Each structure stands twice: as structure tokens, then as C-alpha cells.
Amino acid sequence: MGEKISARRWLAAAVLAVCLLVGWGVCASPVCVRAAAKEVTSGRAKLARKKIKNSRNRVAGVYNKEGQIVMKVCEEGGSAGYLNSSSLNALCAGNQPKTVVIPAGSRVELTNMVYLGSNTTIIADGATIVMTATDKGILSNKPDRVNYEALKNVTIQGGTWKITDKVNGSSLFAFSHGSNVVIDGATIFSNYQSHAIELIAMKNVTIKNCDIKAQGKVRKTSVEDAVQIDVAAPSTAPVIARYGRRFVNGQTCKNIRILNNKIEGSRGVCANYARSDGGKYKKKFHDKIVIKGNTLIGQSAEGCVLYNTLNAVVSNNKIRTNSSRRSQSYSVGLNITIQGKASGKSLKKAKVTVTKNKVFGYRQGIQVVSLSSSRYKKAVLKNNKAYASSKGSAIVTSGARSVSSKGNKTFKR
């Protein structure tokens, strides 16, 4: 692990050295600053060309002069998937700051999931990463702490990420109990039974500028979400229940931003709730979800669903459901529903804002409703265009104590 030192650590050390010198009054001159910068450059030069090996004692990656680790991609026939999986796991492990570059133009076949440590940046612009095994995702983490502490400061930039399995369910990117994650400019090929991105009890996550697509055949009854914002409960997150009971105790997501993406799946985007488990976690609510500038398509269920979400902004989106179940809630374009009774005073200041969207539904276009005695304090709906089987059902708002509605237009679809 000693050689896994990124440029950021060298820079941090140099800055600290300069600050100490200034603080002690030793030297604050440009000469000293230049000397510190020279030390950074020298450190990078020493680091360049150092190698990291995978579990098979093969070279997994090599540091470049910028302090990034450039993955050495294996294309050796039948063993490539295993070796590439081993290499990426070696490069992305641990919590030390690191930037892993997957070379542009490369095709990286995998047979095992890759588990990320904190402080990891993956730059995959122009690369294609393919999971060739069935029933498996690509990137995840192994939670060892709760309170959003298990995974921190992760960025995934670019790349085409895909599974070849078009039938079985999986989660391509699945992160839990962490914070400060950015997924930017990625193209993700999932299938209609899978989640392209699953966030379980996560905080401060941004998904932006991504193109998320589904492969294979859509089933009439499929309700899997291309992007799922999930509560950590035994029924909703069995994949992390195996790590221990404390990881599925009803923890929810906060500060999630979905910006300028194109997302298509059985459902588009869904903030989930825990329906099972004896209703124990039905009162758990997500908070502060922002969905702006997206195209969201649900082929067999809603385009966008926000269950049990305290505060939300849905703005400047094109949202569509193509569900054939037109008399059921699966055919609502934008479905904002309180499923359980909120605990304490959590809903007394809660507000949903829905503005400047174009929404195509059937049973309803846009609905803000409650299936419990809890209500939002305020719902703001302005300048939306909503389509449904009838104009009268294009916009329905019965889930808030106060509703501000202005400039909306309704149409028969």
C-alpha cells in the first residue's frame, strides 16, 4: 500500500510544509514556495512508473507523471475477465486518495464485481467496461460503518459501462451507507430487470450528464428502477443485510441530485420505501431530492416516483410512462406519494416543488398524494404540461395542506 500515493497527497504534503514554514516565520518568500512546488514535482517523478500488482502477482497499473494510476488492461482470451477484475479491485481498494485511469479505447472485460474504497476517482473517458458474467453488477462497496461513513469521496467520470446479461436482475453501480459520490458523464447499459444505479442509505450524491439505457425485453409487470434511491431495510436491501443487522435498520437517503441525464428503464427514477418487514420501516423518509433537466422514461411503470420523500424539487424534466397498466399507479407519469405516517414533526415543514416539467401519464400525469394521515406542508406546481387519459386526471394534488398552482396546462393523452 505504501506506493499507492496519489499526486494529491504529494501536493497536500507540500502545502502543509509551506504553511508550517510560514506559520513558524522561517520563510514565506516565493523562493520557498517554488522549492515546495519543486518537491511536489520531484515526488511525482519518483512515483512515476511505479507498479501495483493484482492478486495474481501481475501488473495491475502503473503510476504516470501526474500521480494517476493507469490500469494495465488484460485482453488474454478466457482469463481476461478474471484478471481485469482482480486488477481493478487492487487499484480501487483502500481509503488512500487515488485516481485510476482506464485507458481510452480499451475494452475491459470483468467476471467479478469491483469494490471501491473511499477517496477513489475513476476516469474512464472513452473506455468500455463490460461485465460478462450473469447476474452480477460492476461497482459497489462493502459497508463497514453506518451514518454515511462507509464510503466517502468517490467520483466516476465517463466510460461506457454495460452488462451482457439481458435477463437476470443486478445493480451495475450499488453504493451503501456512504457520502459524497459523483457519477458524471457515464453511459450505462443495464436491463429491464436491473438497477443501473442503486443508492442505499446514501448522502450527498450527484448523478449528472449520464445516459442510462435498458437492454433486452421489457416485461409488462416489471417495476425495476433504472435509478433507485433506497431505504436500508431487510426487504429492500437484502444484498447488504448479509453484513449485519445494523446495516438494514431503516436508514434513508439525503441530498440526492439527479441532473441532466437521460434515463430509461422499467421505471425511470424511484425513491423507494419499505413496504414489507411488517410495516416497521414505512415511516422512514428520504429528504432533499433534486431532479432537474432530465429525460426520464418508464417503459412498464412510472417515469419518476418519489415515495416517502420529505422535501423535493422536480424541475425542467421530460417525464414519460409507456405502461400498459393504465388503470393502476404504474401508469402515473410523475408519482409523488406519502406511503406511511411520518414520525414526529418531520412533515410540518416539508415542501415539494414541481415546475416546468412536461409529463406524459395515463391514470394521472402528475400526482402529489398521501396514503396515510400525513400531508406535506406545501406543494408548489407551476408551469407544467401534464398529459393523462383525461384532462381532469392530468394533475391531482391531495397530499398537501397547502397547494400553490399556477400556469399549469393539462391535456388528454
Image: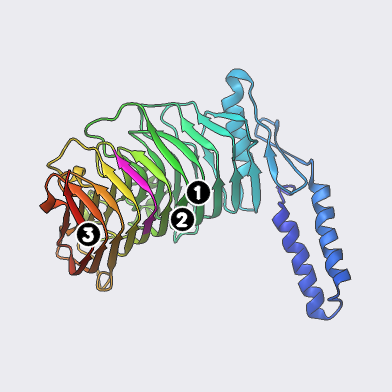
Q: Residue 80's spot in the image, x, y percent?
A: 60, 24
* 198 on left or right of 392: right
**Disc 1 residue crowd, few under 14, some 14–19, many 20+, Cα 10 Å:** many
Q: Is mark 1 on a helix, strand or loop?
A: strand
Q: Nearer the viewer, residue 85 or 383?
A: 383
Q: Residue 159's spot in the image, x, y percent?
A: 55, 38
Give, as a three-letter code, the residue at label 3: Asn
* 99 on left or right of 258: right
Helix, strand or loop: magenta stretch? strand
Q: Which of 52 and 311 is in front in this view?
A: 311
Give, as a three-letter code, the residue at label 1: Ile
Q: What stretch is highlighted in magenta?
A: 290-298
Whether pointer 2 and pointer 1 mark residues with C-beta atoms closer than 8 Å, the reply is yes
Q: Residue 43's spot in the image, x, y percent?
A: 81, 53
The residue at the point 18 percent across, 35 percent down is 324
Give, as a three-letter code, the residue at label 2: Val
Disc on res. 408: 3
Q: Residue 223's spot in the image, x, y percent?
A: 26, 39
Q: Point out the tag, 3 or 2, that comes first from the N-terminus.
A: 2
Image quadrant where one finds the C terminus:
top left
Q: Is mark 3 on a helix, strand or loop?
A: loop
In this view, 388 is above or below 72: below
Q: Point out the tag, 1 or 3, that comes first from the N-terminus.
A: 1
Residue 297 can be seen, yes or no: yes
Residue assigned mark 2: 205
Spot the residue most to the top.
Answer: 77
Spot the residue most to the bottom.
Answer: 25
